[in-house]
Amino acid sequence: MRRKVPALELLAYAVVCLVWGSTYLAIKVGLDSFNPFSFAALRYWAAAPLMGLLAARAGVRFRFELRHLWPAFGVGVLFIGLCNGMVFWAETRLDSSYTALLITASPLWTALLSALAGSWLPGEGRLGVRGWLGIAVGFVGSYFLLHPEKVLPENFFAALVVEGSVVIWAVGSLWVRRVRERYHPLEMATWQMVSGALVLSFIALVRGERLLHSPLTAGAALSLLYLVVFGSCLAFSAYFFLLRAWPATRVATSAYINPVVAVSLGWLVLGEWPGPEALLGGVLVLVGVSLVLGSPQPPPAPAEPE
């Protein structure tokens, strides 16, 4: 008998789907004024204290022992320092809608790594024939998205960087599933923002970036505000909350909706259109995701009392 999904979990899922789908546009608009790694670092330096205050008001107790901190910091390095930094940089070269289509492969990598990590991570999905077929179809779609003849030569490396961020994100998602019971979601989100901001600041410093490369526009300022409040505080809280309640593969189904939101907004606001080949690739990836997520899944591992 299937567990009835609580309304709060559905709301958190909607936030992850819609808000993160819109962040690709916000990043692209902000890059009109900000340099990429400095922009990403500023986003999380602003969001971390807000998240900490939110956690404190919710009665969350922060622990400062190194043994407790390092897994949360490690997740932050992967999710924010690397994945977000790579996406911010890639969007200096790629349209926001095309970037979102590249990230549709996230559930495929999550499912593949989940199946390979069975002994390391009990309770994650085991792929049957349908699941492996879905991964094959999805990676054919990724080939269409990344086909060198369809991607401008100067943008091909940026597209590969985005795909690399997808693999890192999948690894981070599975790591969170392994350590999730040690943290309240708001504590986890706060610590990973701090560690990610540190990494992004270091990269910006090494690159010699200034915060702005041109005068600050109203659109860039509003995009920063949106990314801090909605894209960081709200969406990351919802994401970590879901990873405590659902298998990582199920949470990754948000990738169905993220690209639809991103492509629609990119087209309506910026006049971006990925083109028929990219759309075909995105559709094939989503078909693969559908096959993977339609294969039998074990129930979520029971949560230990905090």
Image (cartoon, rainbow, N blue to C red):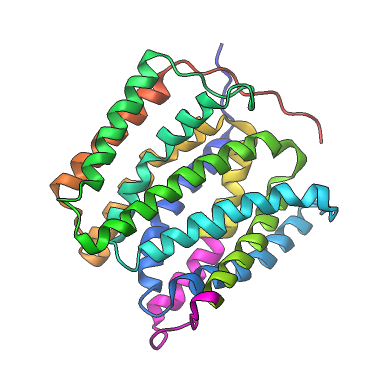
Q: Which residue does the image show at 36% across and 16% down from the upper left?
A: 130
x, y percent for residue 48: 66, 64
Relative to 10, is 154 above or below? below
Q: Which residues are magenta?
A: 206-230
In the rendered image, which quarter contains the N terminus?
top right
Residue sticking out furthest to the bottom: 215
Q: Which residue does the image show at 72% across and 28% down from the upper left?
A: 303
x, y percent for residue 160: 34, 52
Relative to 221, is 175 above or below? above
Q: Which residue does the image show at 38% across and 76% down from the upper left?
A: 219
* Horizontal arrangement in the rendering, residue 58 relative to residue 9 (left or right): right
* Horizontal arrangement in the rendering, residue 231 relative to residue 179 (left or right): left
- Residue 7 or residue 251, whichever sits in front: 251
Q: Which residue does the image show at 15% across and 45% down from the upper left?
A: 277
Total numbered labels placed on residues in the image: 0
Decide whether residue 69 is among the magenta residues. no
x, y percent for residue 29: 36, 71
Relative to 267, is 306 above or below? above
- Would residue 8 be seen by someone viewing this image from the given angle? no
- Would residue 126 be seen by someone viewing this image from the given angle? yes
- Residue 167 or residue 98, whichever sits in front: 167
Decide whether residue 208 is among the magenta residues. yes
- Residue 61 or residue 214, whichever sits in front: 214
x, y percent for residue 248: 54, 33
